[in-house]
Every structure is written in structure tokens, then in C-alpha cells.
Amino acid sequence: MSTDQDGDCRAAAMTMSPLSGRCAAVVERAEHACFGISPFNSYFSAARIRALAAWGLGRFDRVDFFVPDAPSAFTFEAMGYAPQKAAWKARRQGQYTRNKIAGALGSLGVADADKRVLGWAELEGNAAFGALHAMGLRRYDEDAGFRDACHEATGWVLAGKLPAGQVPDDQQIERAVRYFLAELPLFIDTASVVGAGASVFCYHQPPDVLRRLYAGELGWQPAAGQGFAVVAPAVRN
């Protein structure tokens, strides 16, 4: 193996921690991984995305990347941006993130890099995703406990974006929660969306609501073939 390849392998060293025993079983199947890539999170540099991609391609049969591009506008609207400005910011940053993913995959020799990104343009026309999204919206309207959990997750996201010491109000949370509800189908059943037998959603910092979801505490259960794992760079000694 060449020096460059050795460097790539070192860069791709990751730790993976499944959220539950059932998640661990899905991880072992190694069929599909979906990496969540947040458009407005500086954690996801081009180098970090490439490292995740290199690691994922070596660990799973197939890898995709979820980019919540258009739904990011809901967060900006909650922060006070006009809808048109919020949509523009979300669209611009979403394209930038897509380009970073395509560049990372291209550098690793992935021929169909443009087909490995799941953004709103790909998902809104996907029948399985649409059905899951509609189910989540209904549950949000009808299940007070589930709704409270969604609000908690949304408050966690907003707290990291508002000025220090500022707490989001109910109106802001109600607007921004649409972002979380747009992500939720990928936490419930990515496999059905991408046509895989099993899938692991990978992210470096899950909110507590996802731990509760995979522990079976929220009423709506992830599909049998759905797992979640915390994936982060390995600490080198």
C-alpha cells in the first residue's frame, strides 16, 4: 500500500457506537450507511466528509449522504429571516455541501457520486419517504408525548444557533420543528427510502430524543432494519 493510501486510511479511522443492541445488529449486517451531513455545521469540512466517506465505503456495501438542504430554511425562519431569504440561504449552503460530498466521493473513485446524495430534491418525490413524512406529521398532531419530544429536539438545535443566553420561544420552536420532522423519516426507515434491506444512520452528535426513539420510548418504532450509530474520528494516541 502506498504512502498516500496509508494516509487516507489513517484519515478515515472512525469509532462507531450503536445506540442500542438492535442497532448493533443492523451495523453488523453492513448493508447500507446513511451519513447525515448538516449544511451549516463547520464540523463537516471537506476533509471530514472525505474521511467519513472513505471509512464508510470500506465498512458498508453501500453509502449515501443525507443533506437536509431545503428544510434548513425552517430553522432560519425561526431565527427571524424572511421566508425568501431563508430559502435562499438554505439552497446556497445546500449546494455547497453537495459539492463537497461529490468532491470527496470523486477523489475516492466513486463513479456515481451525484447519485449518493439524498437532499430534498431527491426525497420529496420518493414514495417511501413521503409516506413516512406524512406519518410523522400525523403523529406530531395527534400524540402529545411525541410532539413534546420533537419540541425538545428542536429546542436543542435552536439553542446552538441563537445568541448566547437566548432561549427559543414556542413560536420559534413550532416553526423550526418542521426541520426535525423532515429528517425523521431517515431515522425511522432509511432502508425503505433507498431500497436496502437494512440501513444505519450515522451522525457524530445525536440529540437525546434519538436515544429515546431507538430505546422504544416514543411510541413510533424504527423499522426492524433501521439502526443508528454515533460515528466520530478516532482519537489518536
Image (cartoon, helix red, strand yellow):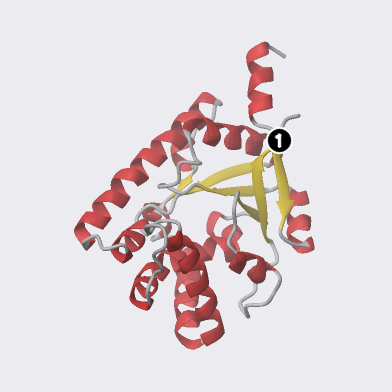
Q: Quadrant of the N terminus?
A: top right
- Residue furthest to the front in view is 165
Name the residue: 50% across, 80% down: 147
Residue 125 position by quadrant: bottom left
Residue 110 in the figure: left or right of residue 90? right
Name the residue: 58% across, 36% down: 53
Residue 199 position by quadrant: bottom right
Residue 225 at x, y = what percent?
Answer: 69, 61
Residue 59 in the figure: left or right of residue 146? right
Q: Is residue 141 above or below residue 166?
A: below
Residue 157 in the figure: left or right of residue 163? right
- Front position in the image: 2 or 39: 39
Q: Is residue 185 above or below residue 114?
A: below
- Residue furthest to the top in view is 2
Residue 217 at x, y = what percent?
Answer: 67, 77
Q: Quadrant of the C terminus?
A: top right
Residue 128 at least partly seen:
no
Residue 15 at x, y = what percent?
Answer: 71, 42
Q: Residues within 10 Å of mark 1 (few under 14, many from 20)?
A: few
Residue position for label 1: 235
Residue 63 position by quadrant: top right
- Front position in the image: 98 or 210: 210
Residue 21 at least partly seen:
yes
Name the residue: 59% across, 53% down: 205
> SS class of the residue under badge 1?
loop
Count every numbered label the image shows and give the total: 1
- Front position in the image: 230 or 5: 230
Q: Is residue 8 above or below residue 89?
A: above
Residue 135 at x, y = what percent?
Answer: 49, 76
Q: Amino acid at mark 1?
A: Val
